[in-house]
Every structure is written in C-alpha cells, then in structure tokens.
Image (cartoon, rainbow, N blue to C red):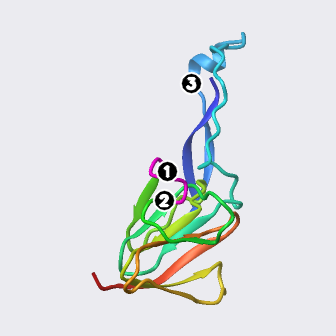
Amino acid sequence: MFGFTKWRAVLPGLMIPVLAVTGAEVATAAPVHSPAVAAQPDSSWCVYPLCSETENDSLGYVLVAHDWCGGAERLSQEAPPCGSGDETLWLAPGYHTDPYEDWDTFRVDGGCVVNYHINYGGSTQVVNRQGRGSQWIRVHDDQTAFIDYDSCWR
C-alpha cells in the first residue's frame, strides 16, 4: 500500500513526507484491499502550519500535553487539561514539539516563574506560581509558545 512513511529535512525544522513504495506495489496492477477499520479521531494530528507548538528556550524542562478541554485560557491543576489519560511530553531545554503534531498546552509548575511569548514578536507574559500549584497555559492552533525563562523554588 502506498503511504508517506518517511520524512526528509528540506530546511532546518522543515520536514516533508516522502512517498515510500516497494517494488511489489509497483508491479501489482490490481487494487489492494484491506479490512475495513473504523476511523479513530487523533487530536494530536494537524496540518502544518495550523498546529499549536511549544519551543523551550529556557534552561529547565517543560511539560506539554496534546489536548485542551474547555474554553478557559489557563487551568490551575496538576493533571493535563483533559485528564490523566492525555499524552504528555517533557520538553528538554533547546527543544520544540513536532511541528506536525498538535501540542495544545504547556504547564508552569507550582513554585516556578515562567516568561513566555506567543509567536515571533509577541509580548512577554509572566506566570508566577510561587507559593501556588501548577497551571496549564493554552496554545491555540496556528500559534507557537516560546518559553523564554523559567526559575523554580521547590
């Protein structure tokens, strides 16, 4: 079956899908049928550049999650916004989320101060969680959150 199974870097940070085809598939003239499978929604998938992303330019690790539930812009809780079943990832300093996946939120840990901005040229936002629990910050589709600074007192 034909499919985009490999990715090739064309510029730093820009990946394009590469069509991978085996010799057997080229030689087969008849269509290939597979068992019917019900489509499953995958909230982590999106079309670049309409994905929400996070780039960690700080010196600490940042927890990001795929999904955002509800209409609020911030949620003060430890668990991800859509519950403990939501996929999370610890983003190391200097790394960013995959631009072809939709990462809708990042967490400011309790006891920490984080400076961030949305998209290039956006104004700096300061989230101060000293003496308080963690807070999740929403990143909308077509936005990139840049974590500029973090400092924690635990």
For label 2, count other residues whose C-alpha is less than 10 Å away and answer few (under 14), some (14-19) or many (20+).
many
The residue to which callout 1 is attached is 86
The answer to which of 111 and 45 lies nearer the viewer is 111
Is residue 85 toward the left or the right of residue 41 in the image? left
Q: Are marks 1 and 2 in contact (CB under 8 Å)?
A: yes
Mark with earlier residue (3, 1): 3
The residue to which callout 3 is attached is 22
The residue to which callout 2 is attached is 80
Q: Which residues are magenta?
A: 80-85
Q: Where does residue 20 sit, x and y in percent of width and height?
A: 59, 34
Q: Amino acid at mark 2?
A: Pro
Q: Is residue 84 above or below residue 71?
A: above
For label 3, count other residues whose C-alpha is less than 10 Å away and answer few (under 14), some (14-19) or many (20+).
few
Mark 2 falls on what kind of element? loop
Mark with earlier residue (1, 2): 2
Give me the disc on residue 78: none
